[in-house]
Image (spheres, coloured by chain):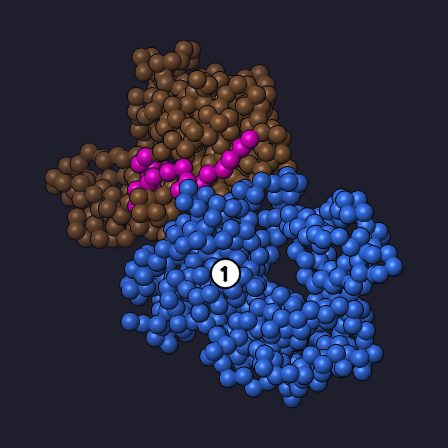
Chain colours: A brown, B blue
Amino acid sequence: MKKIIVQKFGGTSVADTERIKSVAKIVTNEKENGNDVVVVVSAMGHTTDHLVRMAQTLNPNPSEREMDMLLSTGECVSMALLTMAIQALGYEAVSFNAAQVGIFTENVHTKARIIDIKTDKLRKNLNEGKIIVVAGFQGITSDGEITTLGRGGSDTSAVALAAALNAERCDIYTDVEGVYTTDPRVVPNASKLDEISYEEMLELAHAGANVLHPRSVETAKQYEVPLRVRSSFKTDNLGTLILGVDKMEINKPVAGVAEDSSQIRIVVCDIPDTPGEAATLFGSLAKKNVSVDMIIQSYARKSSNTNDIAFTINKADLPQAQEVLNEVKDKLNAGDIKIDDNIAKVSIIGAGMIDRPGIASTMFQTLAESGINIRMISTSEIKISCLINKEDAQKAVKALHEVFALGSDEVADVKGTLPDV
Amino acid sequence: MKKIIVQKFGGTSVADTERIKSVAKIVTNEKENGNDVVVVVSAMGHTTDHLVRMAQTLNPNPSEREMDMLLSTGECVSMALLTMAIQALGYEAVSFNAAQVGIFTENVHTKARIIDIKTDKLRKNLNEGKIIVVAGFQGITSDGEITTLGRGGSDTSAVALAAALNAERCDIYTDVEGVYTTDPRVVPNASKLDEISYEEMLELAHAGANVLHPRSVETAKQYEVPLRVRSSFKTDNLGTLILGVDKMEINKPVAGVAEDSSQIRIVVCDIPDTPGEAATLFGSLAKKNVSVDMIIQSYARKSSNTNDIAFTINKADLPQAQEVLNEVKDKLNAGDIKIDDNIAKVSIIGAGMIDRPGIASTMFQTLAESGINIRMISTSEIKISCLINKEDAQKAVKALHEVFALGSDEVADVKGTLPDV
C-alpha cells in the first residue's frame, strides 16, 4: 500500500492564481514521489477578512452560525481552484468539502472541535489514483450544520486528517522556512531547527512563536503524526520536522528562545489571607473564559495579614477580566488592583533541560548581567519563563540565544513569521 | 396555517451590502404581512464572473464537477450575508445550502435538473417563525455531489421550492419592473403587463424577452405556481403576475412583441429530392445538440428535382452546425451552403389570438406597409414569428407594437432588461 502524505497550504500559499499554480506543482511532485496525496487548503489570502468586513457592515453582532456559513465558503473556493490547477497538469484530482468527507465536529460554532473523520470516501478516491483536495477550517455536525474550527483551524484539519488516514506525515506549507531557535527578525543569525519535539513546539507555540497553532501540535502529539513545517516558496528547504521526543537525538539543552508581548500583568493587592481567596479569584476568571498564564502569590504580610496576588493574562481578555475583578474585589475585601502592560515574557524551551541542572541559573544570571530585572518566573519540565519589562525583551532574547549557543553562521532570510489561519 | 411566499433576489439585487440591506427590508415587510417567507438568492453581482475568470486562468478546460464546486460558493456567501442583515432587523432567520435543504438533482454538472426537494427542515423552521434563506442555482445528488442548475438556475430553484412548499406565490425580484409588451429600450411607450399567461411568457422568453429563463416558467406552469416578476428597486410597483391562462381575463389578442437577433439563417441548396433527406440533416444537428428554430423547405424544383432547405439556429451553435453540414453535404450530394447572419426574428405573442382570425394577416400587412420583407414565417397557437433583415428589426417592432395598440400613455422608465442568473 502506498504511503499517504497530507499537505496543508495556508492563505498566503494560495493567495492568487499564480501561487495556486505553484502549489499544484508541489502537490504533483509529491504524487510523483510515489505517495498518495491529500491536500488541505485555507481560504485565499485576504478572503476571510473581506467576508468578515461585509458581515460587520450588515450586522455588528452576526450570529455565529451564519458566520460559519459565510466563512466556510472561502476554503471551498480555493479547494476547487487548486483541484482545477492540478488537473491542468494532467493528474486526476477531486475536491471535497467537510460535509462530503464527513469531518464531524461538536455542535459549536466558530471554534468547534473535530470528533470524527470518515475515511471511506477518501480511501476510495486515493485507491482510484486521485489526488484529493479538502477544505480546511470547516466541519459538519451530525445534524448537517456547518461549523468552523477557529484559529489554526486548517492546520488542525490537516493533522486530524493525517491521523484518521494513518498518514506517513503531515506537511504544513507556509510562508516561513521552518521553526527557528528564535524570531529571526530579532536575532538575525537565528538558526532553523531540523527537528523539534511536539512538547517543545507546544511550549514555543504558547510562548509566542507564531508558526503553528498549539491545537494542531497537540493533535499531532496525541496521534503521533509527524509534522513538517516548510515553505511553499522555497521548496528545496525541508523545513522542520516535529515528532515524538523519543524519536529524537537531543544535542542541546535548549532548543529555542521565545518572546511574548501579548500579555499584561495584574496585581490584586492586600487580599485578606483567608483560605480560598485564590480559588475565588481564578475560578471567577475561568468562568469568563480568561486564561491565566503566570501566577505569583506573595507571602502573607504579618503586619496586615494580607496577600498580594500577581498574574498575567492575554491583553485581549482585559475587558472580561476587569468585570470579574470589580466583583471579586468587593467579595474578597481586597485593596488596589494594578494593571501593567509594560511587560514581556521571555522563555527558553528544550526537552534537553530535563536532566541537566544549571540551565535556570544560567538564564537568570545572563539576564542579570544584561541589567534586566526579572519580575516573575514560571517553569515547566521543558520551559523556563521570566517576566521582564517590555523594553528589555529584544535584549533578553539576544543574550539568551547567544549564551545557549543557538545561532548559526548563516543569517536567516525570513520575511515574516505570521501564521496562516 | 400561514401562507408561504417564496421570494427570489438576483445578483444585481444583492450586489453589495447596501443592496442586501434593502432586500432584508423587502423580506421582513413580507413577513410583517403575516406570511411565512422563504428567500432564494443568487450570487452577489459579478462574483460568478470573477470566479469563472480565476478558473480559466488555472485551467482552460476545467472539469464541470469542480466548476460546480466553485460557483456554488457564490450563493452561499450572499445567503449568509442576507440572513445576517435580516437578523439585524430583529427577525429570526436561518440560511440553508442545497445540501442542507435537500434539493436533489440528477447527477449532471453545470446544468442539472431538480428531481426532488425535501421540505421537512424548511417546514420545521417556518413553524418556528423563522425566515429561511436558501442558496439558489445549486443542488445535490443522492451521492452528495454538488451540482448547479445552469442559466436561470436561481429562478428555477425559487419556482421549484414554491411548488414543493405549495406556496401561495413566487416573487422574482429583479432589476426590471415587470414584463413589458416589448423591449422599452426600443419602444419607449411599451407598457408593463399586469398579467400574462405562462404560455405567453414562455413564447416571450423564447422570443428574446430576457426577463425570466424559460425553464423557470415551464416549472411554474407545470406546478401552477403563480409567479410575480417585480423590481427590487421600486417596490411600490407590483410588477407582472404570470399565471394560468384559465385564470386570466383576456382583453387583447396580442400581449407582446418580441425581437431576437441571436439567430443565423442557413440554407442548404440543391438537395436531391429523395425521401429522408430532412431527417438526415436535422437528425445530425440534433445529435450535436444544435437546436433548430424555424425551418422552410422549398417545393422541389421540377427541372433539377432538388430542394432547398432553409433553417435558423442560434449563432453560438454555428461551429457545431458547420461540422455537421460539411458531413451531410457530401452524404446528401447537396449544393452550396449559405450562411446569413443579417437576420432578426420578430414575433407577436398572445393567448387571445387563438380564436381571433386575421391577426397573422394584420402582421404581414403591417410589415409590408413598412417596406419590410418577410423571409421566413413560423407559427404556433399563440405566436407568429417572421424572419426579416436585421436592420429592419426595430422598425418592425415599433410598427407591430402600434398596430396592436400595446402602448401606454406613460413612457417606461427601465434601465436594462438583462436577466439575473
Q: Name the residue nearer the viewer: A390 or A203.
A: A203
Q: Where, by quadrant of the figure, is residue A257 drawn?
A: top left
Residue A8, visible in the rendered structure: no
Q: Can you identify the residue that label 1 sits on?
A: B156
Magenta segment includes A114: yes
The x, y position of residue B226, in whole percent, is 46, 72
Task: Tell me the residue at 49%/81% (across/down).
Answer: B248
Q: Residue furthest bottom?
A: B409
Q: Is residue B67 above or below residue A256?
A: below
Q: Is residue B139 above or below residue A22?
A: below
Residue A29, visible in the rendered structure: yes
Residue type indicated by callout 1: Thr
- Label 1 neighbour load within 10 Å: few <14, some 14-19, many 20+: many
Q: Is residue B92 above or below residue A84?
A: below
Task: Tell me the residue at 37%/38% (across/down).
Answer: A102
Taking the image as shown, residue A204 lies to the left or right of residue B237, namely left
What chain is tagged by disc 1?
Answer: B
The x, y position of residue B196, in whole percent, is 54, 77
Taking the image as shown, residue B32 lies to the left or right of residue B190, namely left
Task: Tell me the residue at 27%/35% (across/down).
Answer: A295
